[in-house]
Image: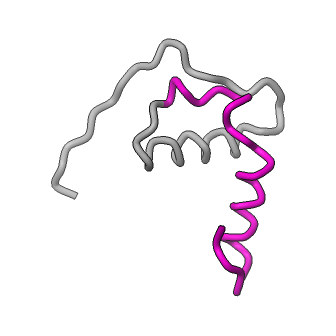
């Protein structure tokens, strides 16, 4: 990893609106960044928590197919 990275300060960054989704929200941010989407597009109503959680379960279960 010789390639430098940049840090951007995002002013209108989406935030979860309950006390239970912080880890899922963090993972979803990483998911957005990994596929080249902007974090400021990551607002709770666009994240699809249910399907993202299902995808995480499928990926972490031994012997399961990925979605």
Asked whether, in this view, residue 45 is left or right of residue 1, the answer is: right
Let me know if residue 66 is in the magenta part.
Answer: yes
Name which residue lies at 64% across and 26% down.
43
Give the colour scheme of this rendering: one colour
Q: In this picture, is 36 found above or below 38?
A: below
- Find residue 24 and report its image quarter: top right
Residue drawn 69% across and 61% down?
A: 56
Residue 17 coordinates in the image, percent (x, y): 79, 24
Give the residue furthest to the top.
11
- Start-end of magenta stretch: 39-67
Quarter of the rendering containing residue 5? top left
Report the residue at 61% width, 47% height from top.
27
Picture quadrant of residue 23? top right
Q: In this view, does 52 lie to the left or right of 3?
A: right
Which quarter of the image is occupied by the N terminus?
bottom left
Q: Is residue 10 above or below residue 27?
A: above
Horizontal relation, residue 27 to residue 21: left or right: left
Q: Name the residue at 77% across, 59% down.
A: 54
The C terminus lies in quadrant: bottom right
Q: Main secondary structure of the magenta part?
A: helix
- Is residue 57 covered in magenta? yes
Frontmost residue, 46 versus 58: 46
Looking at the picture, how far across and down is residue 49, in whole percent? Answer: 75, 44
32 left or right, relative to 45: left
> Is residue 8 placed above or below 27 in the rendered structure?
above
**Residue 13 picture location, percent across and down:** 56, 20
- Single out the residue that lies furthest toward the left: 2
**Viewer-nearest residue: 37 or 8:** 37
Total label count? 0
């Amino acid at each position: 990893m010789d390639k430098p990275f940049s840090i951007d300060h995002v002013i209108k960054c989406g935030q979860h609106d309950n006390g239970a989704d912080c880890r899922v929200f963090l993972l979803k941010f990483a998911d957005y960044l990994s596929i080249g989407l902007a974090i400021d597009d990551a607002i709770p109503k666009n994240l699809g928590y249910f399907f993202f959680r299902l995808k995480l379960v499928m990926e972490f279960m031994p012997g399961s197919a990925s979605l």
